[in-house]
Amino acid sequence: MKYEALLHKYCPDYPKVDHRNVTAKEGVDVFFKNGHQLQTFASEQEGDLASLLGRTQSSSYCPMEGHPNHEPLMNELAALFKEFVAPNGLVKIIYSTALFYGTL
């Protein structure tokens, strides 16, 4: 939750690409006109500070170097990493993936 709060704080485009914007009525139902099924999967990703920063910077919504929000975001991510780092030197990001499937 704290990671996502930083994305909302420093990445102006993040709300536009947030996966929760895909609703059944506006997206999935239109695509799968004959109905669809939903299955969710838990997954996780572990990484060190460099991989956390790199993962964030590789996202299209992340402000690029030189943007006024870039450096503050990287600094707060580093602080967040220090707050949650495990004894093995890694942090874990936990995901829930939603898979919609059906016949086209």
Image: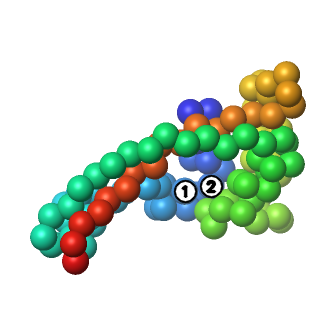
Return the mark for residue 31.
none
Picture coordinates of residue 48, whole percent (x, y): 84, 41
Q: What residue appears at the point 56 percent right and 33 percent down from the top-left corner?
A: 1
Residue hosting label 2: 11
Q: What residue appears at the point 46 percent right and 61 percent down from the top-left corner?
A: 16
Quarter-wise, where is residue 99 in the image?
bottom left
Side of 72 relative to 34 (left or right): right
How many marks can you see?
2
Which residue is more in the foreground, 42 or 31? 42
Residue hosting label 1: 14
Position of the C terminus by quadrant: bottom left
Quarter-wise, where is residue 81 in the image?
top right
- The residue sitting at the bottom extreme is 104
Which element carries disc 1, helix, strand or loop? helix
Picture coordinates of residue 95, whole percent (x, y): 53, 42
Side of 29 relative to 9 (left or right): left
What amino acid type should be assigned to the residue bearing mark 2? Cys
What amino acid type should be assigned to the residue bearing mark 1? Tyr
